[in-house]
């Protein structure tokens, strides 16, 4: 199965705050929204349905994903 190395942006649709991150996944359309403290707290407060994720870029490997 193909592995995707993605750079993504999650937007809080209530207050417009944006969170960016990198994610290694087998499914680009998974429900992953981030693992940082700030995004986790925001999702807990505003609920996951109020966040929209966009993939900004795909990398060929994990090393180039963090470049």
Image (cartoon, rainbow, N blue to C red):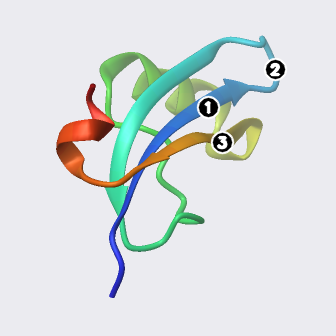
Task: Provide residue 5's location: percent of width, then percent of height.
Answer: 36, 53
Instruction: Determine the CA span between mark 3 and mark 1.
Output: 4 Å
- Going 31% across and 38% down the picture, which residue do you hit? 65
Q: Which mark identifies residue 10?
A: 1
- Going 67% across and 41% down the picture, which residue do you hit? 54
- Going 81% across and 26% down the picture, which residue do you hit? 13
- Marks 3 and 1 in Cβ contact (< 8 Å): yes
Q: Which mark identifies residue 50?
A: none
Which is nearer the eye, 46 or 18?
18
- The mark closer to the camera, 2 or 3, is 3
Q: Quadrant of the N terminus?
A: bottom left
Instruction: Determine the CA span between mark 2 and mark 3.
Output: 14 Å
- SS under mark 1: strand
- Residue extending farthest bottom: 1
Task: Provide residue 36's location: percent of width, then percent of height.
Answer: 32, 26
* Residue bearing the label numbered 2: 14
Q: Is residue 35 above or below residue 30?
A: above
- Marks 2 and 3 in Cβ contact (< 8 Å): no
* Residue bearing the label numbered 3: 53
């Amino acid at each position: 199965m193909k592995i995707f190395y993605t750079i993504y942006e999650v937007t809080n649709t209530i207050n417009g705050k944006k969170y960016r991150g990198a994610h290694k996944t087998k499914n680009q359309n998974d429900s992953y929204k981030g693992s940082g403290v700030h995004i986790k707290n925001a999702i807990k407060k505003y609920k996951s349905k109020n966040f929209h994720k966009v993939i900004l870029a795909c990398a060929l490997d994990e090393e180039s994903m963090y470049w």
